[in-house]
Amino acid sequence: MLSLFLITGCTNSGPIKSFKGYFHTVESSNTLRIDCSSAVQKNDPYGTDIGYMCKVEVTENTIIGTEDGKKLKVNDLAELDVEKTNTPRSVKVVLAEEHDINTSGSSREGLKASKIVISN
């Protein structure tokens, strides 16, 4: 019983407000696919090396920009698509609401971003 307490007591699980990953692609006019493996692994006590993608929705209130403050639109992100550039760009996503992101596919869909910052 004690070892179970120690395992569950030491994991960092639960809802998060933001995560860092890599921008992958613009899936539709308001949905981005972003690598969110770091967020999933925070909630995974087994720490696998599996990569996970999140579908992040952009709303009219979402602020999109670069680290140096340049404002971007979803159309601009299409030019940074990893399939076009073959160069993954680091990204920080701030969610509109806290969300529990884990290995379940449904937990990684329908995430709404309040802010997205792409590395320069």
Image: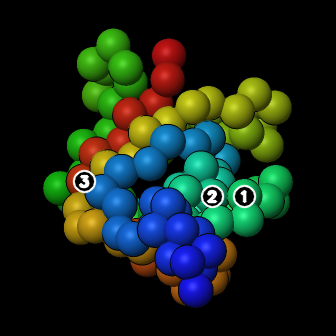
**Along the viewing direction, whichever of 21 and 82 lies nearer the viewer:** 21
Outermost residue, left side: 61
Q: Nearer the viewer, mark 3 or mark 1?
A: 1
Q: Quadrant of residue 52?
A: bottom right
User: Which amino acid does the dot numbered 3 rest on?
Assistant: Ser
**Along the viewing direction, whichever of 59 and 46 lies nearer the viewer:** 46
- Name the residue beneath numbered marker 2: 41
- Name the residue beneath numbered marker 1: 47
> Residue at left 79%, top 59%?
48
Q: Earlier in the sequence, mark 3 or mark 2?
A: 2
Q: Residue 70: tell me if it is visible.
A: yes
- Name the residue beneath numbered marker 3: 114
Left or right of 28, for residue 41: right
In this rendering, the count of numbered labels is: 3
Badge 1: residue crowd in 10 Å (few <14, some 14–19, many ≥20): few
Position in image of residue 87 (x %, y %) = 75, 28
Looking at the image, is 13 positioned above or below residue 82? below
- Secondary structure at badge 3 equals strand
Instruction: Using the numbered discs, state the Cα–Cα distance from disc 2 to disc 1 in whole angstroms.
Output: 6 Å
Outermost residue, front side: 2
> Residue at left 72%, top 58%?
47
Q: Earlier in the sequence, mark 3 or mark 1?
A: 1
User: Which amino acid does the dot numbered 2 rest on?
Assistant: Gln
User: Which amino acid does the dot numbered 1 rest on?
Assistant: Gly
Quadrant of the snapshot with the N terminus: bottom right
